[in-house]
Amino acid sequence: MSETKGQCACGSVEYSFEEEPINTAFCYCKSCQIHTGSDKWFGVWVPKENLTFTKGQPALYTRLGDSGKEMIHQFCSHCGTTLCIDVKVANFYSVSGSTINNNNELKPKMAIYTASAPSWAVFPEGVPKYDVLPPEFS
Ligand SMILES: [Zn+2]
Ligand SMILES: [Zn+2]
């Protein structure tokens, strides 16, 4: 997997990234629930220098994460799909696994913010669960 491509629902914004992601995580925080309309966000963590927008430019929505640092959502202003989140505290994009074109090989390595999950959440089997973040990330 040298190059991975993805796009929003309407195709106005496309991106590609190089090399393997540094992590893959299901995030069950409340913000991810609201943004996905689901119990979780499938975050594919890509170093910022590895990702480029190849078509269109995303609109931005900035919120503060738990760390107090900015989380800048990059979304299509036409169809509203969130493509990735610029995680300022760690200098990577949390790319939406759902927007990756060929994502059948992707698997989550961990479940994070599970303390915020709704009672009806579905957790992956055989994957470590963390109330917030694993010790090495907090
Ligand atoms: Zn779009
Ligand atoms: Zn989250």
Image (tube, rainbow, N blue to C red):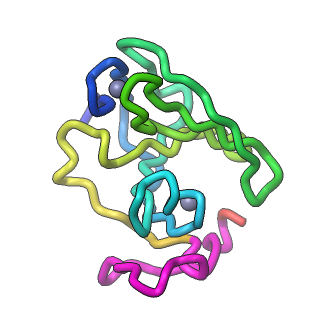
- Left or right of 92 on screen, residue 124: left
For residue 59, side relative to residue 61 (left or right)? left
Who is closer to the viewer here, 34 or 72? Answer: 34
- State the residue in front, 113 or 91: 113
- Kindly report the secondary structure that dominates the magenta region of the rendered protein: loop
**Quadrant placement of the N terminus:** top left
Q: Bounds of the magenta span?
A: 113-136
Q: Which image quadrant is residue 14 in?
A: top left
At horizontal 40% and vertical 23% (from top left) the residue drawn is 78
Q: Can residue 125 be found in the magenta stretch?
A: yes
**In the image, what residue occupies the spot 59% across and 77% down?**
116
Residue 13, compared with residue 27, is above or below; it is above
Answer whether residue 81 is magenta in the image: no
Q: Is 97 located above or below residue 12 in the figure?
A: below
Q: Work out which residue is located at the far bottom of the displayed protein and give it.
A: 119
Measuring from the top left, give residue 120's x and y in whole percent.
Answer: 39, 83
Q: Quadrant of residue 5?
A: top left
Q: Quadrant of the C terminus?
A: bottom right
Which residue is located at x 21 percent, y 36 percent? 101
Residue that sits furthest to the right in the current view: 68
Q: Position of residue 33 (x, y in %)?
A: 49, 62
Measuring from the top left, give residue 23's x and y in whole percent: 46, 55
Tell me where residue 112 sits by quadrant: bottom right
- Please state the total of marks drawn on the protein image: 0
